[in-house]
């Protein structure tokens, strides 16, 4: 059995923040992987339009990426900053390992247009790869576990820079869960519109191929996910990947520990099984293999380096409250993200006709 005490405290804080939501599903549409109307896979990516000074200021790095284990670029979830997502979890873990890492702070606490956030991520991948002189890994939670795939899809030069793509409860095929964003009826922030299961963004993301050769993809999800839905099985999982030439592992935490109760937020923060799978992917060739994870992880209450005695552990969760409250309550917008009445238009580079 997993020891629940500290995890329950964190979960309660997330619940109070509005991070854990639920409700009636909305109609979903499959994001088809075909579609000749979308850009060919090998067309060079567009020029970045965000000023370089902004891109550079948004990137925070620690350690020497030329030394030690494979460096990692950390990509945050919708409604939070990297500090709120990772400063009490994966950043101290990687620092203790001597593993260099960088983190990207997106506009509007990652609630703005994901197409704009992708430019920050493209810059981050190129910069860390250049500094390291070798391939890097990209690790993200929720939106952060999906949006790096937009970069790999539409900026093909980045594919040779990335060794591992690791998504924790990623929204690879959008979600059928709340909040319900419907044109003419509601307003939502851009990133929330774009992560609906029937979003044009999701269809473009998965067009032609979901994965690419020479890149390992590890998708960790949970059957208890209440934010990215459905996630009951790999075959029907919103998070799972299936097409393309990349090496893929889709694994639920319950595949390793059947009694694991972690939901969307804990999978991307404190879950010990997720951490074990992340580390397996980072320390072996190819994606994670669940069979290599020791069953003793099932008795661990949290991932290593999460300190229940540290004030920062709780401070970062509390700091995330204003942004997270925007998700189930679109009218409560404390991050300054624009509230829009429809999904942002796809950029011209997405289409076969180009710009």
Image: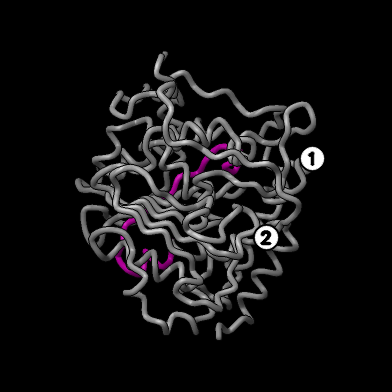
Q: Which residue is mark 2?
A: 318
Q: Which-is-in-front pick, marks 1 and 2?
A: 1
Mark number displayed over residue 152: none
Q: Residue at x 33, y 64 (%)?
A: 288
| In the depicted structure, whether residue 316 falls above or below residue 262 | above
Q: Residue at x 59, y 52 (%)?
A: 228
Report the Cα–Cα distance between label 1 and label 2: 19 Å
| In the depicted structure, whether residue 319 falls above or below residue 52 | below
Say whether residue 176 is left or right of residue 81. right
Picture quadrant where residue 354 is located? top left
Secondary structure under badge 2? helix
- The picture places residue 328, in percent across and down from the top left corner, at 74, 49
Say whether residue 81 is left or right of residue 256. right
Q: Quadrant of the N terminus?
A: bottom right
Q: Residues within 10 Å of mark 1 (few under 14, many from 20)?
A: some
Q: Residue at x 30, y 42 (%)?
A: 212
Q: Which residue is mark 1?
A: 331
| In the depicted structure, whether residue 312 falls above or below residue 203 | below
- The picture places residue 268, in percent across and down from the top left corner, at 52, 61
Q: Does the magenta run of residues contain 100?
A: yes
Is label 1 in contact with label 2 (beta carbons under 8 Å)? no
- The picture places residue 106, in percent across and down from the top left corner, at 52, 40
The foreground one among 231 and 67 is: 231
| In the depicted structure, whether residue 178 falls above or below residue 55 | below
Q: Which residues are magenta?
A: 91-111
């Amino acid at each position: 059995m997993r020891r629940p005490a500290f995890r329950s405290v964190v979960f309660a804080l997330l619940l109070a923040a509005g991070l854990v939501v639920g409700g009636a599903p909305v109609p979903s549409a499959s994001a088809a992987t075909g579609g000749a109307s979308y850009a060919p896979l090998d067309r060079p990516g567009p020029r970045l339009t965000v000023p370089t000074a902004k891109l550079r200021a948004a990137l925070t790095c620690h350690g020497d990426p030329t030394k030690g284990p494979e460096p990692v670029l950390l990509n945050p979830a919708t409604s939070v900053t990297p500090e709120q997502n990772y400063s009490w979890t994966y950043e101290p873990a990687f620092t203790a390992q001597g593993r260099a890492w960088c983190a990207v702070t997106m506009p509007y606490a990652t609630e703005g247009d994901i197409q704009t956030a992708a430019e920050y991520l493209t810059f981050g991948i190129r910069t860390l790869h250049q500094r390291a002189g070798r391939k890097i890994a990209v690790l993200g939670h929720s939106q952060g576990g999906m949006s790096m795939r937009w970069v790999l899809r539409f900026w093909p030069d980045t594919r040779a820079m990335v060794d591992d793509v690791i998504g924790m409860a990623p929204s690879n095929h959008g979600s059928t869960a709340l909040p319900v964003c419907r044109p003419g009826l509601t307003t939502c922030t851009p990133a929330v519109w774009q992560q609906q299961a029937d979003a044009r963004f999701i269809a473009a993301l998965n067009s032609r191929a979901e994965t690419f050769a020479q890149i390992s993809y590890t998708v960790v999800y949970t059957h208890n996910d209440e934010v990215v839905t459905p996630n009951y099985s790999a075959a029907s999982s919103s998070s799972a990947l299936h097409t393309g030439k990349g090496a893929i592992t889709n694994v639920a935490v319950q595949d390793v520990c059947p009694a694991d109760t972690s939901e969307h937020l804990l999978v991307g923060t404190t879950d010990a099984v997720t951490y074990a799978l992340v580390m397996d992917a980072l320390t072996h060739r190819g994606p994670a293999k669940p069979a290599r994870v020791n069953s003793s992880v099932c008795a661990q209450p949290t991932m290593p380096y999460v300190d229940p005695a540290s004030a920062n552990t709780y401070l970062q969760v509390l700091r995330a409250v204003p942004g997270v409250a925007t998700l189930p309550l679109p009218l409560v917008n404390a991050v300054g993200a624009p509230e829009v009445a429809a999904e942002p238009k796809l950029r011209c580079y997405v289409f076969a006709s180009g710009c």
